Amino acid sequence: MSSDKGWDAQGYQSRHSYVFEHGEELVDLLDPKPGERILDCGCGAGQLTAKIAAAGAQVAGMDLSPDMIAKARANFPEIEFKIGDATAFEVDEPVDAVFSNAVLHWVKDAAAAIRCVHRALKTGGRFVMEMGGNGNMKRLLAAVAEVAGEFAITSPQPHGHAGALESPWFFPSVSEYAGLLEREGLEVRFARLFDRPTKVAGENGLDDWLVMFGGKLFAGISETRQREIRERVAEKLRAAMYRDGNWVLDYRRLRVVAVKTS
């Protein structure tokens, strides 16, 4: 799930499968039970939604991207999928759990998303999520900012920036996100910030990543200049992040379990 509707769902599924493959461990933490009603918030192409369903839960998948929802429906026609915004969704009946993997770092209005989660949950229901955490892609974004400066891209943005380029992401610390959850009536039971070096396969792995996930970072820049920036970023990072024919990105993840107490 991205911050807008412009996803290449097929490319996401075929070249960036590590996103949902890493999320399988989060499904284990969710521990879905037969008969539980669960919402997968930001379901993408539906792979983790299907894993939750396989445990016997009554699961529905939601994503902002129509292309992702179309792909999910094609992949798993027996599961309910719907288009929805993480900051403005409702459910027909309260659910036992809301699950979210690799989504909420796209949602800058985190408080609005958490309010929706709180409304969706039964009292005692759980919120199990993982997102990019504080320091995620620090080296990569520093290289992008440095190259942007070399290309004299200097239009400053408000906060949340990567150098002169506005970042489309929200990468909170444990304390920052826990505070948001607690203010909305969700009690944090588990929270962990950890490094997860993430391999993106092949010589073009970094370029593929920047095309798939970094589009908003380069908003308003010509395609030719974007390509030049990506090539220069790869040159800067190759010695540190290219290993044995693959790129390894400096991911950091924030994983949280919280429970609705009121």
Image (cartoon, rainbow, N blue to C red):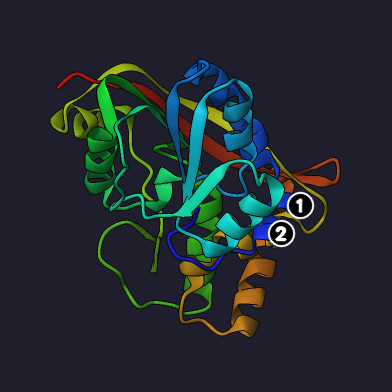
**Camera-side residue: 254 or 86?**
86
Q: Is 251 displayed left or right of 41 in the figure?
A: right
Please state the horizontal and vertical placement of residue 213, each as a whole percent of the image: 56, 58
Specify the label residue 137 is tagged with. none
**Residue holding disc 1:** 14
Query: Residue at (41%, 46%) from the top-left corner?
Result: 105
Amino acid beneath label 1: Ser
**Residue holding disc 2:** 11
Please state the horizontal and vertical placement of residue 42, each as a whole percent of the image: 47, 46
Q: Is 94 displayed left or right of 137 in the figure?
A: left
Amino acid beneath label 2: Gly
Query: Residue at (69%, 53%) from the top-left corner?
Result: 74
In this rendering, does residue 147 appear at all? yes
Q: Is residue 141 above or below residue 255?
A: below
**Camera-side residue: 54 or 256?**
54
Query: Residue at (28%, 36%) from the top-left corner?
Result: 120
Please state the horizontal and vertical placement of residue 84, each as a whole percent of the image: 40, 55
Using the numbered discs, state the Cα–Cα distance from disc 2 to disc 1 in whole angstroms: 5 Å
Q: Is 116 displayed left or right of 220 in the figure?
A: left
Quarter of the image for the C terminus: give it: top left
Name the residue at the right extreme: 245
Badge 2 vs badge 1, beta-carbon distance below 8 Å: yes
Please state the horizontal and vertical placement of residue 196, each as a whole percent of the image: 58, 31
- Report helix, strand or loop for mark 1: helix
| Rendered image quadrant of residue 67 | bottom right
Are there few (<14), some (14-19), or many (20+) residues within 10 Å of tag 2? few
- Report helix, strand or loop for mark 2: helix
Query: Residue at (70%, 62%) from the top-left corner?
Result: 207
Are there few (<14), some (14-19), or many (20+) residues within 10 Å of tag 1? few
Q: Is 188 displayed left or right of 165 in the figure?
A: left
In this rendering, does residue 101 appear at all? no
